[in-house]
Image: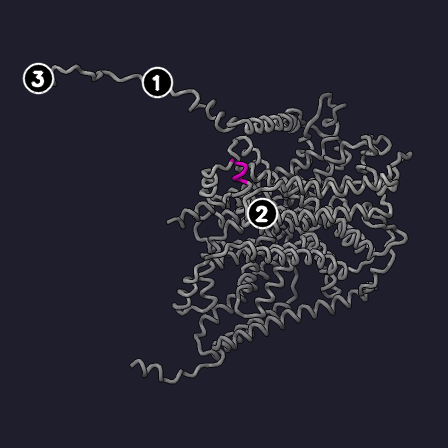
Amino acid sequence: MSTTVDMFRYVRDENVEASPPPNLARGPIAWMRENLFSGPFNTILTLVVLYLLYVSIPPLVEFLFINAVWTGADRDACRAETAGHPVGACWAFVIDKINYFVYGSYPATERWRVDGFFALLAIGVVWLLWLRAPRRDLGAVYFFWLFPLLSYILLTGGNWDFRDSFWIGFIVFSILLVAGIALAARALKTSMRAGLIVGIGIVAVIGITLALVEIDWGLEHVPTALWGGILVTLLVATVGIVFSLPFGILLALGRRSKLPVVRLASVIFIEFVRGVPLITVLIMANTMLPLFLPGDMTVDRLARPLVGVAFFASAYMAEVVRGGLQAMPKGQYEGAMSLGLNYPQMMILIILPQALRIVIPGIVNTFIGLFKDTSLVAIVGIFDLVKTIEASRIDPNWAAPTISYTGYAFAAFFYFIFCWGMSRYSLGVERRLAAGQRH
Amino acid sequence: MQTAVSQAPSPKRSFLYDPNVRGIFYQVLLVAIVSYLFYAAATNAIDNLQRARIASGFGFLENTAGFDISQTLITFSAAGSTYGEAFVVGLLNTLVVSAIGIVFATILGFIVGIARLSSNWMVAKVSMVYVELLRNIPLLLQLLFWYIAVLGPLPQPRNSVEMGAGFFLNSRGLFMPRPLYASDVWVVFAALAVGIVATAVFRYWARKQQEATGRQYPVGLVTLALVLGLPVAAWVVLALAGANPISFEMPQKGTFNLQGGMQVLPEFVALLLGLTTYTAAFIAEVVRAGILAVSKGQTEAAGSLGLKPGQTLRLVVIPQAMRVIIPPLTSQYLNLTKNSSLAVAIGYPDLVQVFMGTVLNQTGQAIEVVVITMGVYLTISLVTSFFMNIYNRRVAIVER
């Protein structure tokens, strides 16, 4: 015991001051050493990149912001000799033309209708893409039926003129259709209820659609030749997505069908469309669609490329959906069948809800491609955003050296914001889905 | 009980419930609808064409074209050439810009893709910005930008910039000497062919030797010597013998424009720049995904064997990544070929611009022209995917 008491004690009674972290292991300098200058090769690379940035970034910033002209009424504001200073981007040009870029030649007093279309589109997109939105099934009904219908009425004015004989014919046809379905149900000895619901549903949807189009809403008729700019760009993209999803799903199901004729037809359509450039499809729609229709029928100039885009997008969408169908474990199909569900029930209730969910990123990526490709309608003479810029940049009122670059920069900015936003969204969804599947 | 169930006669069911009957019904329905659509379209088309007095059939390919094309790889003149020849010119122009674009896009794409994975923070970030920026802006807009960006600074033809050695630059393009081949030029090309064959044989032999003995041969040097050296030697020998196989026609400055020589159109340069930079961004993503698909253990194992980072990439990672990279890479090549049709927006005379543009407008024979043009692209696509499938089967991992 005595030895412990007498022992010399080495125990400190206060804490040692922590020594500062070595400069070379932490902090910005160490980070730079590790990530930028970790060897002769990396150092050279860093210096080369720095030089490239030095060459490209300052002139770009100078062009876009520092030397940019923000106000002005005509070309004098944007010419170096009249403005008295070097001129970069001429944003005054964009500000002056912004209504043309957004609405095209849509009558100024009617532009609120275009704004209404934008708002309806935004509601539909948010409803469908926000994964926690309530009642997304109603959202689908809205997006694929109500929204196109309302937009059509809003943008064109609706107010079709059907004759009374048309309505009589429609009613007779409806009764025949419902009766036919009832007879078929009778022959199959199944309950008549389901058949009647489907039949009346189809008739009601078509009837309401036609009735809404015929009602005079008091909206002035605006011919499509006046539409333009961002309105047309978004319209082409919307038509593409609204048509391509249902058709794409049908084509994908057809491609995986056990019926050889259905499968062959789907494969031929998909591979044909995917094998040719969009521009040839657009030119084909433009020149051949009028040929294939009876001589007295004319197709609206704007509707032709819309048909082409819808076909084109369907083929690409079909391949995305097929990926989702193939990714479904076989047990899902077998489980559905063992519950006694028939093919439509199995697909609508079990397979498609899951398959479509996992291909949301693929659908969004296809849509990004589609959105960029809408610019091609400019080549067949439709006034989308690119075409309005092409038309404005040669306006003699705004003849200045940097006008073209400014116009292109504006369009690039617009497309970039949309596409980049969508790609961020699809990455986010992908991450969420991956998190759900991690075990 | 069991036997009783199996022996019970199956209940009588309507044949309407037989899935085979239903299947046949649906297929017959589909065939009927599709054939009706085709029939209606065909009769309407015949009607409309007769009313518009437009000829049909492929006879128009023999007619004189009567228009000029700014870039022709075969001899073509407005007066003496046919629509068929115009088609060939357009096709060749499409193929040329696609082939060169594919080469450059592959090189740039691999550089950017590997740079995105670089440990150098700045290089990785700059590549990321490049990819994000280029991928999210429509190609058409980029082409229009490149067109005015390339064309803008170029001088008028009368103030051509003389670059020496017969090279001139003005707003009509880059002019350079045109090679004129003498009759005995075949010797040079024969030497090139011999060089390529010899290289292939040598490479095969060198690999066998390395597998057998472990000895390595300077494959790169020998390749260079055979492929470049042999034709050059043949040329020098011919030149010394007094028969110069290749001479050059120099562009001459005229009053308004340059005469003679070879001309690279500004449209071609703009299209090439646009296609290359745009597709490279997509290829970069393909390459990045492929490299990330090679498990980290491979890199670590290579490192523990003492391979340097460059060797690891070249000998271990890339060969394995190629298996993942090649299929999407091919579809990017096809995309580039299809996207070259956007040439029509800036006036480069590719297949679509010449054939679906000028020829279609002049003849009005929409159906024939569209069928031929789409057929060309479709053939390119299908042939490529056919070879792709063969390749895929060869490189697929053999599961043991």
The residue identified by callout 1 is: A19
Does residue B309 belong to the magenta stretch? Answer: yes
Q: Chain of mark 3?
A: A
Which portion, as a residue range, is magenta?
A: B308-313
* Real-space CA distance between mark 1 and mark 2, rounded to the nearest whole angstrom: 60 Å
Foreground mark, 2 or 3, reads 2
Tell me the quarter of the picture where residue B80 sits.
bottom right
* A172 shown above or below B189: below
Q: Main secondary structure of the magenta part?
A: helix
Label 2 to label 3: alpha-carbon separation:
82 Å
Q: Is mark 3 in CB contact (under 8 Å) with mark 1?
A: no
Residue A316 lies, in percent from the top left, at: 59, 55
- Viewer can see residue A436: yes
Whether pointer 2 and pointer 3 mark residues with C-beta atoms closer than 8 Å, the reply is no
Query: Image check: A62 left or right of B368?
Result: left
Q: Which amino acid, by three-letter code, is at mark 3?
A: Ser
**In the picture, residue A170 is in which quadrant?**
bottom right
Q: Which residue is mark 3?
A: A2
SS assignment at label 3: helix
Amino acid under disc 1: Ser
Are both tags, 2 and 3, on one chain? no
Label 3 packing within 10 angstroms: few (<14), some (14-19), many (20+):
few
Q: Secondary structure at mark 2?
A: helix
Q: Which mark is residue B136?
A: none
